[in-house]
Image (cartoon, grey):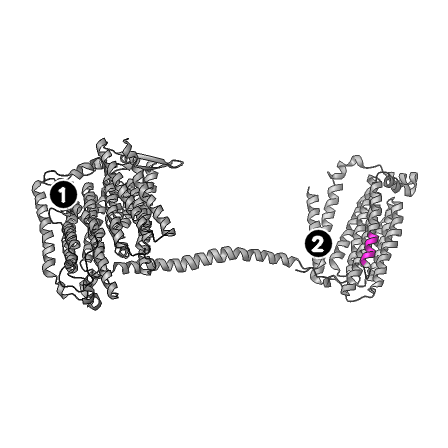
Amino acid sequence: MLLGPALGVSAVLFVLGVAGVLLRRNAIVIFMCVELMLNAVNLTFVALAQQLGPEGQVIVFFVMAVAAAEAAVGLAIILAVYRHRESVNLQDINLLRG
Amino acid sequence: MPPLIALVWLVVALPLAGFVINGLLAFVRPQAKAVVSVVGVGVLVAAFLVAVGVVRALAASHAEEGFVVTLWQWMAVGGLHVDVAFQVDHLSAVMLLVVTGVSAVIHLFSVGYMREDPGYARYFAYLNLFVFFMLVLVLGASFPIMFIGWEGVGLCSYLLIGFWYQDKEKADAGKKAFIMNRIGDFGFLVAMFMIFKATGTLAFDEVFREASRVFAVGGPTITAITLFLFLGCTGKSAQIPLYTWLPDAMAGPTPVSALIHAATMVTAGVYLVARTNLLFALAPLSSLVVAAVGALTAIWAASIALKQWDIKKVLAYSTVSQLGFMFIGVGVGAMAAGIFHLVTHAFFKALLFLGSGSVIHVMHHAYHATHRHDDAQDMRNMGGLGRWMPWTAALMWIATLAIAGIPGFSGFFSKDEILASAFAHGGPGLLVLFYVIWGLGTLAALMTAFYMTRMMLYTFHGPNRTGDAERGHLHEAPWVMTGPLVVLAVGAALGGLLNLPEVLPGNGWLHRWLEPVTLAGDVYRTEAHLAAGAEWGLLGLATLIAVAGIAVAWRALRPEELQPAAGAVPETGLQKWLLKKWYVDEIYDRAIVRPLVWLSNRILWKGVDDGAIDSVGVNGSARLARGFGAIGSWLQTGQVSTYVFFFVVGVLLLLRAVTRT
Amino acid sequence: MHTAIFWVLSVVAVGSALLCITRRSPMASLLWLVLTMFMLAGLFTLLDAYFIGVVQVVVYAGAIMVLFLFVVQLLNLGRAGPSDLKGWFGRAVAFLLAAGIGVQLWALVRAVRGPGGFQSQTAAFVLPEGSVARLATERQALGVVAEPLLRQYLVPFEIASVVLLAAIVGAVVLAKRKI
């Protein structure tokens, strides 16, 4: 019943997440936008779970677990990079240039 | 097939074996001159004896068409079938004997002439190789086999002309010969291609069987084929326009000039026309061209010979001129006359060259002894040598009388037959050209008598100009060199018996011997007969001309007024033009060689090779690769944002793909 | 009633997401994202995913976002510095690409739900209206997720815990000053 609009909201949130990733230079903010995208996907799964069964919710469970793990590791990396470069601006992190 | 005829391969293999042995010796033990001499001369003498056996077997078998001895199959590709095969028939029999016989004699002469040369073994190796190729040429039963010989003798000619290659001039002479020959070879090749396309085969007997069926008489195809073949002949036999290499070829050792550039290689063109006489009979226009070019060359070269000072150059231009005579013969359809002159010319021209070789040899010794560096070949430095070299002088006089055309000697009969044949074809209208050809030939004969007498006069008679210190060192040449001259002199004197004119008894033996070869073509040739009266008249005229030429030269030229070459006054006017060979070499250089060099240098090298292939092709593709690499590296910004951008683009495309399906 | 709540929650979620991606201060972005997550939790609950809604608040908003908060505070990035948004070219590119993705997603949804789309083909799989809600009543909220999780998806469940362990170890190692 709410499936259509729910999918639409999810799509909008996802698009906003993509825009955010492309727009920002701050590594942490970009990461947050990635989390936003993940949440949008979660919403899609939950909306579809209403129609197709509780497996959708199980998937969301896993997504959240992995997102947590990923957030921890990613932030640790950002911390390590900050220690070297004194900056989280992505433009300054370009040692792989060439 | 008589067993001896099957052994014809031995004639070819013997000189090849000589080449291998002498070649190895040249590398390993060049000082082993005795072994080299024995091997080098021995294989030739053996080859001559086997050749005699083969020819006798052929004559005894009474097989008019001859035999084809197939050794092995060379190529069978699609429609092309070429075997390594030798054709033993009446024409190749004549050539076989001439080549092996004269070569054997000249090899013997070389033993004495090249005695002190450090490249002795190499010389004999090359000379043996040459004879091998020449035999392949005359014995080949198909165009490709003959072409192998054709190319091979060109190669050996190059190797032998430039024998003393450390001298740049001599090396250049070798190059010139080879390159000019190549131009002719192009003609031969094109003719071969056309023959194969028209008849589907390249073996002589098969081509001649098909020829009358496939080619229209006087048609464009056969005319083109024969003209291309003749182009090959002008290159190999030094006719206009490709004759200028032969005088330069005198840079090689004199026996080489005798063998290759007088008796054998240069006659290959005449042999080719004789062998393919059916094709030339089917193309009357080409035959006329052959005769006309022959006549022009004869008189052109004779005019140049009138004023040359180098003894070998006189003989070289004489050879070009006499080859012109041979082509007149085969051009008007008198194959036997052309071949007859080929045989007699081999005798007296080889004799003349070897004799001049003896003279040069002795002059060298004299100058060497007194440490002077004058030109040993310039006639102005000679004079009165008959006093010290009576045998050489006498033998060379025999050859001179022969070439001048004094009755009784071989040259008289052969030259007369050619000119008589030309005259016989004459008539009203277009046939008047034959009279013109006859006239040019007769004029050239007059000049021949004149310049040969001049040569003999300046060399062997009159006062000696060599120098007082040298005079004591002048002597007769050793027997190993004079002996071969005797053999050749016998041939020069008595060779006329081979083919006496019709008005004399015992006539036309060679003509009859060669009839099986010319039979097929005779159908298309116009029969030309001279009345007995006309024939006697021409004989008389020829005698008159010969005698007149000699007499005028003897009376008009004053050897005592000559100065030695070093202090000579340079020529002026017409004499200068003759001495400078009508500036033909210079004209060729300006008109052909320089533009070609310019083309090769600026356009083909700098333009195409450097510019297009190197810069655009090789370097260009490298630059292109580097450019792509630069683009690729431009993508590696190291910025995460760039990578994310491409990431998202990829996702976008993926989504598109999913929604589409 | 449901619809109204849905729309309110959605609008606020989208609005705060928009604000999240445009604030200059990372701290502000973070807080707006937290709000988005709360709204999403509400949406989950509305869609009969009660357990997931709670977990969203507890784990996502409560743990992950707190983690972000810690890092932001640690690196002292809270203040609004010079804007770290890209220039006009970057904005144009971002807008275009995002719009492109949006269009594609809309097309995808239409392909699924439109006439002749997948949905009609997978009609057999569609459960009757409100079946998940009934499940939640039967098994209690937790049971909806727990039952498949500990029955069919036990192995992935265990693997997920290993992943979390790896993440812990990795995070500790990466963030240490001296290894």
Position of B342 with respect to C142 (left or right) is left
Position of B438 with respect to B218 (left or right) is left
Amino acid type at circle 1 is Ala
Q: Are marks 2 and 1 on the same chain?
A: no
Residue at 81% x, 66% y: name it.
Answer: C80
Residue B218 appears in the rendering? no
Position of B155 with respect to C14 (left or right) is left
Residue B30 appears in the rendering? yes
Quadrant in the picture for residue B580:
bottom left
For the stretch drawn in magenta, the main secondary structure is helix
Amino acid type at circle 2 is Leu
| Subunit of label 2 | C
Quadrant in the picture for residue B285:
top left
Badge 2: residue crowd in 10 Å (few <14, some 14–19, many ≥20) = many
- The circle on residue B424 is 1
Q: Which residues are magenta?
A: C167-174
In terms of secondary structure, where does tag 2 sit? helix
Between marks 2 and 1, how big is the CA–CA gap? 101 Å
Q: Is residue C116 above or below residue C63?
A: above
Position of A28 with respect to B434 (left or right) is right
The percent coordinates of residue B235 (x first, y second) are 28, 50
